[in-house]
Amino acid sequence: MRANLLRIALPLVVLALSGCARSDADLRAQVEEIKAQRGAPLDPPPVLRTFESFVYQAQSLRDPFAPSTTTEVADSGVRPDINRPREPLESFPLDALDMVGTIGTGPAMVALIKDPSGLIHQVRVGNHMGQNFGRILAISETGVELVELVPNGTGGWLERQSAIALDD
């Protein structure tokens, strides 16, 4: 049995190995043909643009990033009342508050202001709201006008007009 198997297997192995010894002459010829071809032309180098130079001539001016060297403090005279009890809407920035409506007419008009937690507050002229000591000046059907006190950067305070419009 082994002898028969050996007679059949040996010619098959020789036949399989003879297929692997193929000539690579056609491959070498193709590589030589590709090498002989001329390459594509290169793009011309980019043209360098010349820029007009700029001469900085503000060396003698004050540095805008340095603190002011003046000892005088510009003060407009307005100051927040620190001893006044804080009102509930003063713990929120103005952009977080929404006007949702009004109650009444004329000088007795009350504005309805919704805080970020969803609670609705009634405010009148003279009440305070916002984190910059905002005081309500006027209430209309379309909005609330107020004045805020903001630091001016030199130890004083500035008044800044603000408003909250009725949400549609």
Image (cartoon, rainbow, N blue to C red):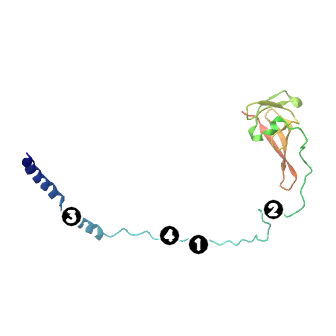
Of circles 4 and 2, the one toward us is 2
Disc 4 is placed on an element classified as: loop
Of circles 3 and 4, the one toward us is 3
- Residue 99 position by quadrant: top right
- For the residues labelled 3 and 4, the Cα–Cα distance comes to 44 Å
Q: Quadrant of the C terminus?
A: top right
Three-letter amino acid code of the residue under disc 1: Thr
Three-letter amino acid code of the residue under disc 4: Pro
Residue 2 in the image, given as x and y percentages of width and height: 9, 47
Determine which residue is flagged by label 2. 67
Three-letter amino acid code of the residue under disc 2: Pro
In this rendering, the count of numbered labels is 4
Residue 15 in the image, given as x and y percentages of width and height: 12, 55
Q: Nearer the viewer, residue 139 or 83?
A: 83
Determine which residue is flagged by label 4. 46
- For the residues labelled 4 and 2, the Cα–Cα distance comes to 46 Å
Disc 1 is placed on an element classified as: loop
Q: Residue at x 81, y 36 (%)?
A: 89
Q: Which mark is residue 50?
A: 1
Determine which residue is flagged by label 3. 24
Q: Earlier in the sequence, mark 3 or mark 4?
A: 3
**Dots 3, 4 in contact, CB < 8 A:** no
Quick one: label 4, few (<14), some, or many (20+) residues within 10 Å? Answer: few
Disc 3 is placed on an element classified as: loop
**Dots 1, 3 in contact, CB < 8 A:** no
